[in-house]
Amino acid sequence: MSGRFNSAYWPDVGVRFTSITHGGGMSLVLDNLKKSYREPGGGRIPVLNVSRFELQTAEQVALIGSSGGGKTTLLNVIAGITSPDSGRVVIDNVDVTGLNEPSRDRFRALKIGFVFQTFNLLPAFSALENVLLGMCFSGKGTDSHRATDLLTRVGLGHRLQHRPPQLSVGEQQRVAVARALANHPSLLLADEPTASVDIANQNTILELIRDTCRENNVSLLLVTHSPDVAARFDRIEKLSDFNRPANN
Amino acid sequence: MNLVTIAIKSIKQRLLSSSLTALSVALGVMLMVGVLVINGVVSDLFSQPSFGFHLVVGPKGSDLSLALSAIYRLDRPGEPLPYLFYKELKEHRAVEKAVPIAIGDVTEQGGFPIVGTIPEFFDLDYAYNKPFRVRGEYLKTPWDAVIGSRVAATNGWNIGSEFKLIHGGAESDHVHDEKFRVVGVLAPTGTPNDRSVFVSLAGFWAISGHEKPLKEAVDRLEKFRYPVPQSLRDKAEKPKKVGDAHAGHDHGHDHELLDEQKEVTAIFVRTKSTAASIGLAGEINEDVRAMAVNPIFPMKRLMTMIVDNIKLMLLTLTSLIIVVSAVSIFVSIYNSMADRRREIGIMRALGARRETVFTIILAESALLCLGGGVIGLLLGHGLVAVASPIIEFRSGILVNPLSFEPLELVLFPVLLVVGSLIGFLPGLAAYRTDVAAALSD
Ligand SMILES: Nc1ncnc2c1ncn2[C@@H]1O[C@H](COP(=O)(O)OP(=O)(O)OP(=O)(O)O)[C@@H](O)[C@H]1O
Ligand SMILES: [Mg+2]
């Protein structure tokens, strides 16, 4: 997607995302992004203040930072799950912050894969169904062949019908990874996707995520606390290096 | 996977509370179906031309009582008509066929009504264009009997069975000595004929006690302006002597009754045309002696007066039950919303729109209502199946458990609307869920 006016069109929702230009090959641009939370006392805690952050298409970045630093908040704002106080999130040249809510939901379903820190699997649904569920809301229809294939690749081919409570924590995390990849996203946000698995599986999952992203030209923003994991990435960003909430 | 399967999934997830709420709908619907089906059958029975004649003629009095006693055999017969009146009516130019019946006795076993009649009775269709069918033969000798299918089934009678009668209804304990013999069994008709026993008028009259006290008969003949033979008048005025061979409970087979002595309860008349029946009824009703009734009218009146009111009451009650179960569905779904906030947040985070999660909740409650409705429909017909022998035993009304009321179809759109209304508020809660907050729960 390059050129001055690009657009992505989803005929089934009739929503046209008119692109704005931020140069070619840019997957993610954060521009003067600010986010604060309401304090239980009444004031506001500033969490994010990012003046500029860029991610090239198909680039892979490890995001590290101290606990409570705002990494999850940043991913939520990028995904449109949380609204920023101000600033812009531009994904694939679409200003996501400028979309109305239904379009943003649709955009998220189609363009963003999210591996949540807490997995966020639905306990009533089997591993396979959890992956299918991710496809269900994209409007592109479900593909159980692909879902099975993804689960097999994270080593859960023998656990398709298990529900999350019947899976180990590491297995649940792998289901979450498979679900995030299900819709062919163009941007994958992964919040400590290997925090709960052993070293062998950590490597497998990490390689699965990275290979899939590479094969499909997917940009990857991966939060990790593990120096081992971070060390595998060419680009490592420390949140506190570009986030200065105190300046709010 | 689609929104409906997701809704089904979450119903399954809360299986106990889901099944309880569906059950409460099912019970309401079950009662409603029961009421509708039984009501439908009863009103069909009473308001459709479920007889192959135009008029029933009987003594002056209540038209409803005449219909209930002569056709449905649910009521005691009123005063009889002289047999001579039947003979006169039969010759009327508008009459195609006139069939007299005499009722009042019941079988000793089972208490089924006895209908004394002539063989031509079976030439009249039992319902419009539906002729009687018999296994065996129709009435020939005075002691022959043709029995309805229900009588045969209940009493275990077959051709060749013999039975006795009780005089004047089941409460009386006077058993006649005379024995009748079954010569034919009618195919089921779904009419009161199924639980009737037909004997010839000759046999009916031959039973002791059926020759009315002669004084009464003479009075009635005079009222009907028929000449009273002197011999009869003499006998009527002469008090019976003790030891008289014909006194008390004598057996009638060995003496011939005069036509003047014979009486019938009612006469079924088929006229040459429907129009002719109106003229004939007018003619008969002008006269002080008897009345002619198109049984449809009193029965319709009965339906609107009593049965319809009862139906309305029962339907109101069952609607209230459905409302109560609707409220319980609402409470159950609404309560589950707290547990489901996170679930909804996850779906939203996966890209589900507000409308989508709203629809899922709505589908869930609509499915519960509809599912309960289907179960209730089956249970309702099951209830009718269980109740129909009891109803039949009590009232003689045959109820087919499979008979379907068109109103039952209305139930489903209604349930769908109710289900959607119930799902609306919880759906709205889902719609309003704040994704980030729900995810951090
Ligand atoms: N809904 C909320 N309301 C108020 N404060 C919040 C909320 N969510 C997060 N915070 C605060 O914002 C800060 C950043 O939280 P966040 O979850 O983004 O941190 P994180 O970098 O992901 O930490 P971790 O590495 O432990 O996952 C924390 O101090 C947290 O207390
Ligand atoms: Mg976090």
Image (cartoon, coloured by chain):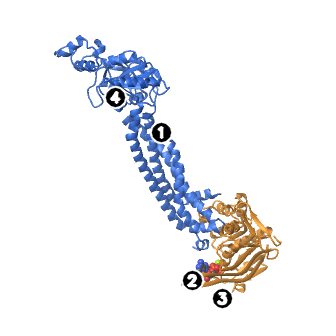
Chain colours: A orange, B blue
Side (left or right) of B279 relative to A152: left
Chain on which label 1 sits? B
On whether disc 3 and disc 4 are found on a single subunit, the reply is no
- Which quadrant of the view contains residue A164? bottom right
C-alpha span from label 1 to label 2: 67 Å
Residue type (three-letter) at the residue carrying disc 1? Pro
- Which quadrant of the view contains residue B181? top left
- For disc 2, the marked residue is A39
Q: Is residue B153 in view? A: no
Q: Quadrant of the N terminus of chain B?
A: bottom right
Side (left or right) of A43 relative to A21: left
Chain on which label 4 sits? B
As drawn, B208 above or below B8:
above
Q: Position of residue A76 (x, y in %)?
A: 66, 75
C-alpha span from label 1 to label 4: 27 Å
**Which of B270 and B212 lies nearest the eye of the viewer?**
B270
Q: Position of residue B20 (x, y in %)?
A: 48, 56
Secondary structure under the numbered disc 3 in the rendered image: helix
Q: Position of residue A105 (x, y in %)?
A: 67, 68
Q: Are marks 2 and 3 in contact (CB under 8 Å)?
A: no
C-alpha span from label 3 to label 1: 78 Å
